[in-house]
């Protein structure tokens, strides 16, 4: 597989074409909710993401955005991955995904950690391209910020 | 090198055919650029179509910098030793070379770190004058609340943000020309945009996004009618066209070395002599003074008044050599060669799903072409091209308002320079034609 094909794996192209979580959704009144707008100033890609937290669980992620296939697919994969997970798990997944993006195409030695990422492990190929890592991280940055804004992290 | 050519945009035929670069000559030109010989992405030959962002450098420029450091390096305009004399001579010879290249007098060229710094220098000079600096001579740079500064929707951020900031500091009002569907400056409502309150009209000679050549004569005439000063962002014209700033009649102009085969870190501000003489300094410190007491300072005449601190001497020498190198090749012939390349570039409009943002033909435009591919984001377009060894720019190219005008967040941009070949553009077209299939878009 060429480097280009490693980056644009079918699972990424599929998510980019039919993204999950697109379309902002209001959280139920008894849940915590936070919203974040993130921009990649080098290319103008942007995302507005809203998180819905029920107690210590991410009950839902929804977003609107425009950008390249990597940023759109990454936000979509992330939405699927974190929904229904405990905040502690989400923080761990965020850390593992950042580690993967810093791996310069090598991936992770920790197979369990990579397995936990599910479809997000398909972004290994992206980490070979320094200019594209920010694209893959845009949604994750919005998630982290919206969680902080929701007040859920403070307990 | 000539100082008498009038500006002849690429789309305008001259009175005689100036000739273009033949295949053998183009091959010789390319052989002068070491970087063009390298491979990228697994051994593919490099096809460099990002010269509007920054150009590659010929050996003579690289060697001029090395030679300066190996043989002449010393502080300029101070010291009486032989090296100081030789360094100063090289520095000032470079100024003369750059001035001659753009049809200016030598003392009308101020070294700056680049065009962005040059444009900011002018904006801050207005600011300082408005704050009362510069005495009676600086009256024409003083702005009052309600005075107007005019730009265009096609500007690079470097020729927009400094004017926004100047307005914020002074109470002046920013107004602008819109652009038509081809990205050309729309002069239809010139009388509404340029008014009796207009003090500055700042615009790009050639758009770094659309490649469109601005109607310089019309804008200069409109500015003069109301007594406004003109500021030309000449970054994308000086490397590609014969430019004669005196003939254009602009009051100020800015351009960068790194886009015209020279080093990074140096550029030039052109200002008409009487204006530079009347303009208060911006960056202050060593080398730009006459008499300094503990209480106050008097300033050197231009251009030194605007060159505080140790200058980028080796880079300036490199810029001078780049100007000479282009001048010897002949800017008429460079422009002709690049006009042929522009005609090859706009043929991407024939590829299904590809839409050019800017003029669709090669008339009155240079060889810089931005485009979108239906269903594929510019970043993804650039990535597929990069995989074929083809380097293009993706993003908003520091012109967000122009992209907003066309309803897109980002475009891909292919741009040529003197060393670009028609074969490279054919390879680019072929690779571009395969992009939609790669992403399964039809």
Image: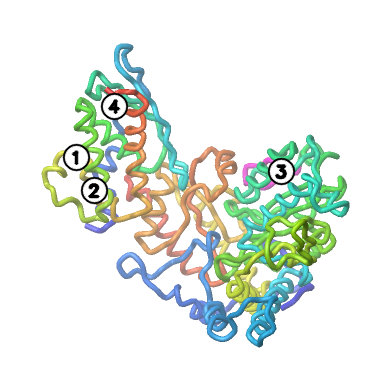
Structural distance between the alpha carbons of marks 1 and 4: 21 Å
Q: Earlier in the sequence, mark 1 or mark 4?
A: 1
Q: Which mark is residue A153?
A: 4
**Disc 1 + disc 2, Cβ < 8 Å:** yes
- Quadrant holding the N terminus of chain A: bottom left
Q: Which residues are magenta?
A: B178-187
- Which chain letter goes with mark 4? A
Do marks 3 and 2 both belong to one polypeptide chain?
A: no
Q: Is residue B285 visible?
A: yes
- Which chain letter goes with mark 3? B
Q: Which mark is residue A100?
A: 2
Q: Position of residue A15 (x, y in %)?
A: 28, 37
Q: Earlier in the sequence, mark 1 or mark 2?
A: 2
The residue that mark 1 highlights is A117
The residue that mark 3 highlights is B186
- Quadrant holding the C terminus of chain A: top left
């Amino acid at each position: 597989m060429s480097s280009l094909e490693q980056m644009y794996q079918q699972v990424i192209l599929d998510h980019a074409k039919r993204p999950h979580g697109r379309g902002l959704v209001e959280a139920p009144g008894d849940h915590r909710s936070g919203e974040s707008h993130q921009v990649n100033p080098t290319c103008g890609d942007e995302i507005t993401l809203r998180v819905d937290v029920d107690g210590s669980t991410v009950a839902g992620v929804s977003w609107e955005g425009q950008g390249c296939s990597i940023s759109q697919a990454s936000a979509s994969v992330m939405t699927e991955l974190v929904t229904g997970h405990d905040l502690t798990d989400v923080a761990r997944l965020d850390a593992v995904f950042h580690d993967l993006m810093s791996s310069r195409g090598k991936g992770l030695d920790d197979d369990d950690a990579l397995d936990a990422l599910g479809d997000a492990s398909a972004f290994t190929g992206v980490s070979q391209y320094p200019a594209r890592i920010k694209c893959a991280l845009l949604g994750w940055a919005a998630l982290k910020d919206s969680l902080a804004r929701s007040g859920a992290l403070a307990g | 090198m000539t100082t008498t050519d009038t500006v002849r945009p690429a789309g305008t035929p001259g009175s005689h055919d100036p000739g273009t670069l033949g295949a053998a000559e183009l091959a010789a030109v390319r052989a002068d650029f070491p970087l063009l010989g390298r491979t990228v992405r697994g051994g593919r030959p490099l096809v460099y179509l990002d010269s509007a962002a920054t150009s590659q450098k010929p050996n003579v420029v690289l060697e001029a910098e090395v030679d300066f450091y190996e043989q002449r390096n010393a502080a300029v305009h101070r010291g009486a030793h032989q090296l100081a004399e030789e360094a100063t001579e090289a520095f000032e010879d470079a100024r003369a070379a750059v001035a001659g290249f753009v049809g200016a007098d030598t003392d009308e060229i101020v070294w700056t770190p680049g065009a962005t710094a040059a444009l900011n220098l002018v904006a801050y000079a207005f600011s300082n004058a408005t704050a009362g600096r510069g005495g009676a001579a600086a009256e024409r740079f003083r702005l009052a609340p309600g005075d107007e500064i005019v730009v265009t929707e096609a500007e690079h951020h470097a020729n927009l943000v400094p004017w926004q900031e100047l307005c914020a500091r002074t109470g002046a009002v920013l107004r602008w020309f819109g652009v038509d569907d081809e990205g050309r400056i729309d002069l239809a409502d010139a009388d509404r945009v340029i008014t009796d309150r207009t003090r500055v009209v700042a615009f790009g000679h050639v758009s770094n996004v659309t490649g469109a050549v601005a109607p310089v004569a019309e804008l200069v005439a409109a500015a003069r009618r109301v007594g406004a000063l003109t500021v030309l962002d000449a970054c994308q014209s000086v490397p590609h066209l014969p430019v004669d700033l005196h003939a254009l009649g602009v009051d100020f102009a800015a351009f960068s070395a790194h886009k015209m085969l020279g080093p990074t870190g140096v550029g030039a501000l052109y200002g008409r002599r009487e204006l530079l003489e009347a303009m208060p300094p911006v960056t202050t410190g060593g080398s730009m003074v006459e008499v300094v007491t503990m209480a106050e300072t008097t300033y050197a005449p231009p251009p030194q008044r605007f060159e505080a601190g140790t200058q980028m001497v080796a880079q300036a020498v490199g810029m001078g050599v780049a100007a000479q190198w282009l001048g010897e090749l002949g800017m008429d012939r460079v422009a002709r060669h690049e006009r042929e390349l522009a005609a090859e570039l706009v043929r991407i409009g024939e590829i299904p799903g590809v839409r050019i943002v800017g003029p669709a033909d090669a008339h009155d435009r240079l060889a810089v072409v931005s485009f979108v591919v239906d269903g594929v984001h510019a970043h993804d377009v650039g990535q597929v091209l990069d995989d074929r060894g083809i380097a293009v720019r993706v993003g908003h190219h520091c012109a967000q308002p122009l992209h907003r005008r066309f309803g897109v967040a980002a475009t891909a941009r292919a741009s040529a320079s003197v060393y670009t070949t028609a074969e490279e553009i054919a390879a680019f077209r072929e690779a571009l034609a395969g992009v939609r299939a790669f992403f399964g878009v039809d």
